[in-house]
Image (cartoon, coloured by chain):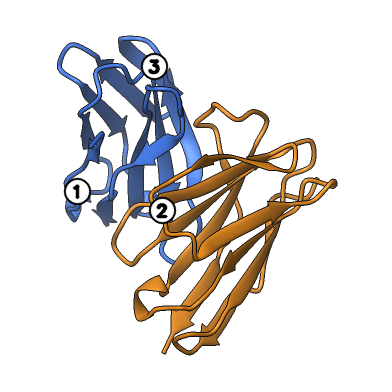
Chain colours: A blue, B orange
């Protein structure tokens, strides 16, 4: 079964620190990767996507992709309490369907 | 510009009943996908509609069915409800079928007693 794996956490970091969220995937044919943020009781919101190996930066967020290691990460610099949420990793699984497959999400807590 | 809207937001049903959930996609989007999210889990893909047809389906039984209307809005129907169907049902719209760039509605929280 083609899967996306995330540590459920919670990951607790102090305000101002770098939060590092990780995700691995099983299908080597996966080509596109997405990070969604989901606040408690709310729906997921797309914050980053990455298609190529390397880093992609957007403000305080950096997505990193290593296809050889089948590893995706999201770094949040200068973490704020408002970043406290569950972060969902999703991959477009190949094999004809190209439907996003989500991990279970990592809960991030940023404490003042 | 209205985003994705879903109704109802909350509902309670008993085992064996049937439920219909509704979704209007974001303006300009013609593809609608439905996901089920159990507590503490990631969203699980149910099916996707494009041009009023079911294009893709996840690993859900036939009790789950859907429809897309000419205005791109969509319905999710679940028959013979089970306790395990209790979850947040998310509708997501997108500009294309094969994309991970999804816009989610606020969801319909279903409780089956």
Q: Counting other residues with Cα less than 10 Å from the Cα at mark 3, is it few (<14), some (14-19), or many (20 or more)?
A: some
> Which quadrant of the structure image shows residue A16?
top left
- Alpha carbon separation for disc pair 2 and 1: 12 Å
Res A80 visible: no
Q: Of the two numbered discs 2 and 1 on the same chain, state the one appearing first in sequence.
A: 1
Q: Counting other residues with Cα less than 10 Å from the Cα at mark 1, is it few (<14), some (14-19), or many (20 or more)?
A: some
Quadrant showing the N terminus of chain A: top left
| Coordinates of residue A91 in the picture (x, y in percent) | 36, 30
The residue singled out by tag 3 in the image is A56
Residue depicted at 78% across the width and 46% down the height: B72
The residue singled out by tag 2 in the image is A82
Give the camera-side residue of A28 and B69: B69
Discs 2/3, front: 3
For this orientation, the residue located farthest to the right is B71
Residue depicted at 44% across the width and 87% down the height: B15
Note whether A69 is above or below A24 in the view shown: above
- Alpha carbon separation for disc pair 2 and 3: 22 Å
| Coordinates of residue B6 in the picture (x, y in percent) | 67, 63
The residue singled out by tag 1 in the image is A13
| Coordinates of residue B63 in the picture (x, y in percent) | 49, 66
Give the camera-side residue of A21 and A89: A89
- Label 3 sits on a secondary structure element that is strand
Provide the chain ID for the residue under circle 1: A
Note whether B108 is above or below A76 in the view shown: below
């Amino acid at each position: 079964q083609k899967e996306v794996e995330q540590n459920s956490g919670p990951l607790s970091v102090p305000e101002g620190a770098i939060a590092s969220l990780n995700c691995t995937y099983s299908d080597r044919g996966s080509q596109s990767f997405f990070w969604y943020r989901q606040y408690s009781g709310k729906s997921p919101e797309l914050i980053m996507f990455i298609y190529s190996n390397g880093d992609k930066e957007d403000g305080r967020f950096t997505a990193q992709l290593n296809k050889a290691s089948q590893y995706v990460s999201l770094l949040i610099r200068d973490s704020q309490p408002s970043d406290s949420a569950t972060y969902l990793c999703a991959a477009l699984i190949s094999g004809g369907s190209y439907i996003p497959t989500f991990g279970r999400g990592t809960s991030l807590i940023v404490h003042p | 510009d209205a985003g994705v809207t879903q109704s109802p937001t909350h509902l309670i049903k008993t085992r064996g009943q049937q439920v219909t959930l509704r979704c209007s996609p974001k303006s300009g989007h013609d593809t609608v996908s439905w996901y089920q999210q159990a507590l503490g889990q990631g969203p699980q893909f149910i099916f996707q509609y494009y041009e009023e047809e079911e294009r893709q389906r996840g690993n859900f039984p036939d009790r789950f069915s859907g429809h897309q209307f000419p205005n791109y809005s969509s319905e999710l129907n679940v028959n013979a409800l089970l306790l395990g169907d209790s979850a947040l049902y998310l509708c997501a719209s997108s500009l294309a079928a094969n994309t991970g760039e999804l816009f989610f509605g606020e969801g319909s929280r279903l409780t089956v007693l």
